[in-house]
Image (cartoon, rainbow, N blue to C red):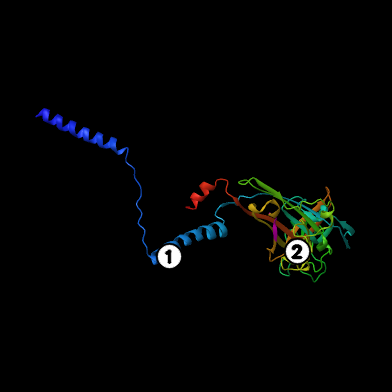
């Protein structure tokens, strides 16, 4: 019985090995069936053309599926303001205002406040004086330390609190006319550097030109000089939908959006920014300022226009890894 089993195993092994060996020389080919049916043929070709048209027309041409995008913009903004104004008040007389006087904080930031109006209280010294009555029913504005005394200007008056502080007390009322009347003609130079790390692409918004006098005479205009980085303040507020006179008395806030939307496949020269201007505030912008020495000071309550410069960007370009990008598109 053991001999019979061995012969049976030997026979199976021989058959299997022989079949595997002979299968090496087999040749396989696909068998196609041609259906001579015009309706089926037309439907088949329409499906092929639809898929091909979708890939070429929608994915590659319309959606530019061969491109990658980068929105991780890196940006830096430098600002410089130019302009001179003259004021003449009873408190301080004739004063000439330059950028170092009416720009807060100092120039170079992407947020700046430009003084257009102010209320001045000159020659304040520390001492005792009568508080300013804010309302008929209110005695004072907490401008100093109360002494406990009530000062009456005449026998029939209710009196005013005496305080120890900086005297005379600051005036608090809304001005009716701007003092820096030509502020709308001031110009602001905005230089913006941007970089998109994925494509190693960097550029600035200053037009590259061989004309060395271009920046000295150009002013931004959407049609004539769309790539000039120098803006007139009056033009900025006008493009935001307001007159500068709506803000120069009690102040305002303007957003300047620098938008970089570029297709890098079109070339370096075709990537240029667009500017959008929007008014953000609904009330006055007021800043308290003090210019003083050790025992004497000049107090200013200033009104002005605040400019917020924001940068947004998105670029697209040919993928640095086309095969992997097409796999992400399931193509």
Mark 1 is surrounded, within 10 Å at the Cα level, by few (under 14), some (14 to 19) or many (20 or more) other residues, namely few
Quarter of the image with the N terminus is top left
Q: In percent of the image, x 25 and y 34: which residue is there?
A: 18
The span picked out in magenta is: 271-275
Q: Residue at x 75, y 67 (%)?
A: 238
In the image, farthest residue toward the bottom: 156
Q: Secondary structure at mark 1?
A: helix
Identify whether 296 is placed above or below 160. Answer: above
Choose top left, top right, bottom left or bottom right for residue 143: bottom right
How crowded pointer 2 is (Cα within 10 Å; few <14, some 14-19, many 20+) is rated as: few
Q: Is residue 125 visible?
A: no
Q: At which x and y percent is residue 231?
A: 78, 59
Q: In screen coordinates, is 85 left or right of 189? A: right
User: Is residue 272 a member of the stretch shown in magenta?
Assistant: yes
Q: Position of residue 146 (x, y in %)?
A: 74, 57
User: Which of pointers 1 and 2 indicates the residue nearer the eye?
Assistant: 1
Number of marks present in the image shown: 2
Regarding residue 317, the answer to whether it shows in the image is yes
Location of residue 164 (image quadrant): bottom right
Residue 198 or residue 320, whichever sits in front: 320
Between 106 and 198, the one nearer to me in the picture: 198
Q: At 76% from the left edge and 50% from the top edge, which residue is drawn?
A: 108
Residue at 53% of width from left, 60% of height from top? 58
Whole-angstrom CA distance, mark 1 to mark 2, is 52 Å
Furthest toward the top, the residue is: 3
Location of mark 2 (residue): 223
Which of the two labelled residues, at mark 1 and mark 2, occupies the earlier sequence position? 1
Q: Position of residue 14 (x, y in %)?
A: 21, 32
Q: Quadrant of residue 19?
A: top left
Q: Nearer the viewer, residue 101 or 10?
A: 10
Q: Is residue 23 left or right of residue 132?
A: left
Residue 42 is labelled as 1
């Amino acid at each position: 019985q053991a001999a019979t089993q061995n012969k049976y195993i030997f026979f199976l092994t021989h058959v299997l090995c022989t079949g595997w060996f002979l299968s090496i020389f087999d040749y396989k080919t696909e068998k196609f069936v041609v259906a001579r049916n015009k309706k089926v043929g037309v439907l088949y070709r329409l499906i092929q053309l639809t898929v091909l048209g979708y890939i070429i027309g929608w994915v590659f041409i319309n959606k530019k599926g061969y491109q990658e995008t980068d929105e991780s913009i890196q940006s830096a903004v430098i600002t410089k303001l130019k302009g001179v104004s003259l004021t003449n008040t009873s408190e301080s007389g004739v004063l000439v205002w330059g950028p170092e006087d009416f720009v807060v904080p100092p120039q170079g930031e992407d947020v700046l406040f430009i003084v257009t109006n102010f209320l001045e209280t000159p020659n304040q010294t520390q001492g005792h004086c009568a508080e300013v009555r804010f309302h008929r029913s209110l005695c004072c504005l907490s401008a100093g330390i109360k002494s406990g005394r009530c000062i009456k200007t005449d026998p029939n008056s209710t009196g005013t609190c005496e305080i120890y502080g900086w005297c005379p007390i600051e005036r608090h009322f809304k001005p009716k006319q701007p003092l820096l009347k030509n502020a709308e003609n001031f110009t602001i130079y905005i230089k913006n550097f941007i970089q998109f790390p994925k494509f190693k692409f960097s550029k600035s918004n200053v037009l590259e030109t061989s004309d060395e006098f271009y920046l000295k005479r150009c002013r931004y205009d959407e049609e004539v000089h769309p790539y000039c980085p120098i803006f007139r303040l009056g033009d900025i507020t006008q493009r935001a939908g307001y007159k500068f006179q709506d803000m120069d008395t009690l102040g305002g806030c303007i957003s300047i959006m620098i938008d970089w939307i570029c297709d890098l496949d079109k070339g370096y020269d075709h990537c240029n920014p667009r500017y959008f201007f929007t008014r953000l505030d609904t009330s006055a912008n007021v800043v308290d300022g003090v210019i003083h020495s050790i025992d004497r000071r000049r107090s200013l309550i200033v009104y002005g226009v605040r400019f917020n410069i924001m940068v947004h960007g998105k670029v697209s370009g040919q993928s640095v890894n086309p095969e992997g990008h097409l796999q992400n598109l399931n193509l």
